[in-house]
Image (cartoon, grey):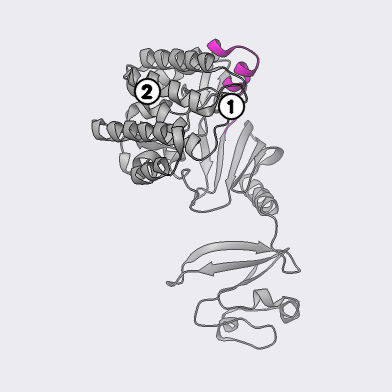
Amino acid sequence: MLLIVATEEWTMRKTTKSPGEKIVKDMDYSLLRQIPPILTAPGHYLGSSSSVMTLTCNGAGNLSRALQYDALGEIMPEHNILTDRASRIAARWDLTLGDQLQHNKSRAVYKVETANGPAVLKLYRKLHLSGERAAIPFLKALPDDIALKIYRASPMRRAVLMEWLDGPSLATLIAEGQTVEAEEHLAHVVAKLAKVKFKNHLIYRKIREARTPNAFKAAAAAQTGQRQKLCKKVAEILDGLLKTTEVETVIHGDLQFQHAILTPNGPRLFDPKGLCADPAAEYRLVLTPDSGDLTVDDFIHCVARRAMLFADATGIDRQRILQWATVVWGAGVMNGKKAPNGPDTVEAYLEALLDLAVS
């Protein structure tokens, strides 16, 4: 692998040598003539294998960004970057790549075969992927009957090998009409999670609503009409929650039915964020069902049932659980992510949530 390292002090050129080129041995100058102008600007690098890579340094000369190019200088699709990394990690860790379970612009997930059976390989494209950096220590701190196991991770945590869990997700149970059963399974595992004592809270960041309360207020004020009135009430609830939070704990942070697998030995959690928050905030995402075709009455009945179930299982105040769910659902209204398909308006759902949260 040939890599030319560039800093702000010099520029790589197609036909002339530069100070930076002197540090590279056995350079293929014929390859340099094939590189288009986009790769000859200051701060770019050349790597020769199956592709060309350009890396950007910050003012201190530290790596801050990486883009990968094909032989013609075109930026490689992110899918290809992650696929290439998966192949390299598989070879290094003696894995056999299987089905690709997930792929988006920031990550890819594969089922793999190891010497000891199936496992999951998760790859992150960015070094600083928001919200994921605490997932590994969070999972490592949990007993085996709560979440999947971490087998191995790369030094920068951009590649993680995890336990493969057999069984349907709790979201699958809900889709099959077993909503109450799925809720009871989740309550069973979160009751165990609520008892776990985490040693180092400093590595876990706060949830978004706690980090940016002023932005939340501004978003509420930017609404119009009846929606603005309702959203301001939601902002007041958030303000009250933040002022009355006495103890913060480490939470899963992305607790949802699709992030729990019903294994033969019971439900197990996966895909956490690892956050530090009011314990009641753990249920802010899972309390409200997808409104979809649900009427307001059915929607609120489900929310109330789940709030009682999780409060009873964990000993956490039911009203605070309801209020955190209302805050997050209200945020979804403000950013346009809540649009029920039924005859009721989004304002009707939010108003009903507010009534439940403050009653």
Q: Which residue is at the front of the view, 120 or 304?
A: 304
Q: Is residue 174 magenta?
A: yes
Q: Decide: is 224 above or below 30.
A: above
Q: Residue at x 52, y 44 (%)?
A: 153
Q: Which residues are magenta?
A: 163-180
- Is residue 194 shown above or below 127? above
Residue 90 in sight? yes
Numbered tag placed on residue 138 in the rendering: none
* Alpha carbon distance from label 2 to label 1: 23 Å
- Relative placement, left or right, of 134 versus 48 is left
Circle 2 residue: 321
Badge 1: few (under 14), some or many (20 or more) residues near its Cα, within 10 Å? some
Q: Position of residue 52 (x, y in %)?
A: 68, 67
**Quadrant, the N terminus:** bottom right
Residue sitting at x 65%, y 52% = 88
Residue 5, x across and y down, in percent? 56, 74
* Amino acid type for the residue under numbered disc 1: Pro
The first of marks 2 and 1 along the sequence is 2
Q: Is residue 359 magenta?
A: no
**Which circle marks residue 340 in the picture?**
1
Q: Residues within 10 Å of mark 2 (few under 14, many from 20)?
A: many
Check the picture and name the quadrant holding the C terminus. top left
